[in-house]
Amino acid sequence: MTSEKAVEVYIDYLVKIDKQLDPRESLQDLFDWSEPDEDRFAQDGRMIFASAKISKELTTALMWLNDHDVDNRCIRMKPYRDEDKLLVDVQQVIPLPEVAA
């Protein structure tokens, strides 16, 4: 992904949530950059998977990725309703929090 593609994706997201921000300025603030830097952009990739149910196949694939030095996390998110409130129980499944470095 390039920084320009990230801006395009971010613009789509901002439209969906009806947020009025300058996407380029907002992303540069996030990265603490004064201007876009393609050489440093997206050098440390990480995947985060979130699901209410974690299948054996997903677990196997994520463990394989971890074994091949691809940084990833798997988060279980179980939604609950308490009257008019929506609560979400969030737990990291892979890697186990006890062994994560």
Image (tube, helix red, strand yellow):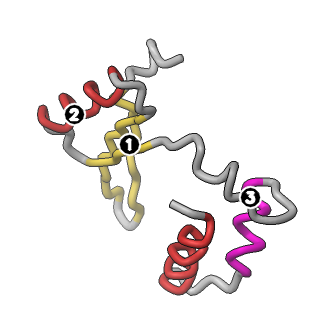
Q: Are marks 2 and 1 in contact (CB under 8 Å)?
A: no
Q: Which residue is the site of mark 2?
A: 61
Amino acid, disc 3: Asp
Please state the horizontal and vertical placement of residue 47, each as a whole percent of the image: 42, 44
Please state the horizontal and vertical placement of residue 70, each as a whole percent of the image: 41, 32
- Work out which residue is located at the far front of the displayed protein and give it: 39
Rendered residue at 32%/40% (across/down): 76
Disc 3 residue crowd, few under 14, some 14–19, many 20+, Cα 10 Å? few
Res. 76 mark: none
Amino acid, disc 1: Asp
- Work out which residue is located at the far right of the displayed protein and give it: 34
Taking 97 as reference, is 101 left or right?
Answer: right
Please state the horizontal and vertical placement of residue 54, each as a whole percent of the image: 20, 39
Q: Is residue 21 above or below residue 35?
A: below
Res. 37 mark: 3
> What kind of element bears circle 3?
loop
Taking 79 as reference, is 98 left or right?
Answer: right
User: Can you tell which quarter of the image residue 63 is in?
Assistant: top left
Label 2 to label 1: alpha-carbon separation: 23 Å
Q: Is residue 13 above or below residue 27?
A: below
Stretch in magenta: 22-31
Rendered residue at 32%/57% (across/down): 81
Amino acid, disc 2: Ala
Please state the horizontal and vertical placement of residue 39, each as a whole percent of the image: 69, 51
Taking 91 as reference, is 44 left or right?
Answer: right
Badge count: 3
Label 2 to label 3: alpha-carbon separation: 32 Å
User: Can you tell which quarter of the image residue 4 is in?
Assistant: bottom right
